[in-house]
Amino acid sequence: MNTAATNAELIETKEKMQQERCSSSDRPLDPGCLLPQDAERSADQPGRAVVDFPVAAVLPAGGSGERMGLTTPKQFCSIFNRPLISYTIQAFERLPWIVMVVVVVAKDNHDLMLNIVRKFNHTKVKVVHGGTTRHRSIYNGLQAFSDSTDSSTPKPKVVIIHDAVRPFVEEDLLLKITLAAKEQGASGAIRPLVSTVIATTSESYLDHSLERAKYRASEMPQGFLYDIIFQAYQRCSEFDLEFGTECLHLALQYCGTNARLIEGPPTLWKVTYKRDLAAAEAIIKETLSVSACIIAEAEEEAVELAKTLQKNLNMMETDVIPCGKESNVQYLSKTRNFIHISASASSSLWVLEMVKCFEDIDHARLYPVVIVWVQLSMTKQSADSQETDEFMALASEVKQRNVLLYGIKIDHSKEWHPVWSSAAVAHLLQAWTCCAFRDALLHTSELEQWQRSLERLGQITLVLIRDRNMALTGQMLHV
Ligand SMILES: Nc1ccn([C@@H]2O[C@H](COP(=O)(O)OP(=O)(O)OP(=O)(O)O)[C@@H](O)[C@H]2O)c(=O)n1
Ligand SMILES: O=P(O)(O)OC[C@@H](O)[C@@H](O)[C@@H](O)CO
């Protein structure tokens, strides 16, 4: 055999396969955007325009979450003191074109679920009891619409079935799934496979491997004409109900309806193992930390510091507003992160006034709001114990309303109180040329120290916002 020819063929084949792999749609070149679109959408959602028929959702949540390895079923595990299932419900409830969300829970969790509905003010939810398998739970959920005696759950035209432990689902995909289900009778979200699928022998050896490019992972949401999926469940076998995992298969097998498949974003994954809960928390933290509102009290030092801090928080979208405007809904509703800068340990009355504003627009119901109070300390003394106790008590009070209050003191006690803006640096340069030369040199080391303090202030502020650590609320940190 001509080795040179064989090598050339091998190289050519490898290059061809590499080109195919990079071009084929089954290989996401990068994980893509992991941040769900806005946690809440404004009133003019696109769906409102095109969905002119009743759409409902069924969220199976009757499992025990064995693979999570916790005593609490994973759908009730909390992120920021809020159960995972509440995030999923909210993803559907916030859309006006979804009229009802049926949540299917184990009988033992009925009261727990009702408490969650009440605490987080979920208004479109009906709770029904699940079964011993996911399919049985889904079937129970669908039956809630077929109970003609219960006018509170009218039969929808399209029903979306979505695992309650898939909290990140965006309106755009729900719209596509709904419209495809209306047109085709069934639709389902899919994702490229990350690992290759293989078949094994009974002795756990490799039987054969599947050509990954020809397969996809079936995810959720899935959509169906209600009559089709309900009929499929009525007709399916006990074996299906006991061992099946695929609703699309039931629609095809028992109603001859072939689902339209729609590729969704990477955030569709199902929370199954502990790592998935950590990933979900990280995504929610990231989503909550993209913006901030910096509120500066009137003193020049506070205004200058606000502008400097805005530059140091360059990875966030920030507004700087004068004190007093923060109650303006246009600022309040844009973010859940507020940084209040005062040139002294001014009165803390503004905190309670802000929290009142949050309550007026229900701003902290679903996600914790962060307030970082930055105080320019004109004296080197650290806060006295009374001031510390009062701040801790205030933080404890507002935490009850899901507002996390943190304090940072930045030492500003210098004879020459430079707020190191361009004006201050210009003053230094001007002093460089006249009799204040010696003073200017003395202050240079202070300038470097002040710059370091400013950098630390930006870093600590960002960490407090991103982590929303409950244990640090009420602490007065020093930079
Ligand atoms: N009898 C069941 C079993 C599962 N589910 C729901 O179906 C979804 C997807 O199922 P899965 O991830 O398997 O959840 P669990 O069965 O709880 O997990 P595990 O298999 O690890 O026990 C979950 O929201 C789960 O609560 C359900 O409603 N009724
Ligand atoms: O099998 P599990 O109960 O873990 O999860 C159900 C998933 O299989 C299902 O949600 C998707 O594959 C779509 O059918």
Image: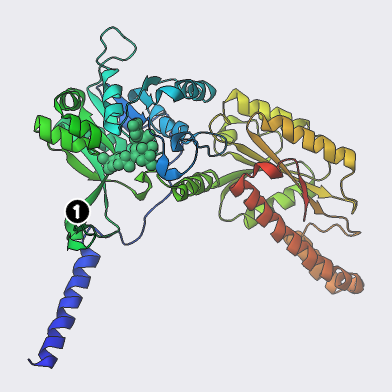
State which quadrant residue 406 falls in.
top right
Viewer-closest of 194 and 112: 112
Q: Residue 347 at what x, y percent from top left? A: 82, 34
Residue located farthest toward the top when viewing the structure as drawn = 149
Figure quadrant, ligand 2: top left
- Where residue 131 sits, quadrant-wise, is top left
For disc 1, the marked residue is 215
Q: Cβ of disc 1 within 8 Å of ligand 2?
A: no
Residue 50 in view of the camera: no
User: Quadrant of the image for the C terminus?
Assistant: bottom right
Q: Residue at x 26, y 19 (%)?
A: 143
| Vertical side of 235 occupied by 18: above or below | below
Between 326 and 135, which is closer to the camera in this rendering?
135
Q: Secondary structure at mark 1?
A: loop
Residue at the image position 84 percent from the left and 37 percent from the top:
389
Q: Is residue 215 above or below residue 362?
A: below
Whether residue 317 sits left or right of residue 450 in the image: it is left
Q: Could you say which is closer to the camera, residue 375 or residue 36? A: 36
Q: In the rendered view, tell whether residue 332 sits above or below residue 464.
A: above
Q: Position of residue 39 (x, y in %)?
A: 46, 38
Left or right: where does residue 275 sit relative to residue 336?
Answer: left
Place of residue 136 in the rendered image (x, y in percent of width and height, measured from the top left): 27, 28
- Using a 10 Å C-alpha cutoff, classify the residue at mark 1 as few (fewer than 14 neighbours), some (14 to 19) or many (20 or more): some
Quadrant of the drawing holding the N terminus: bottom left
Q: Residue at x 89, y 54 (%)?
A: 380
Farthest residue, direction front: 203
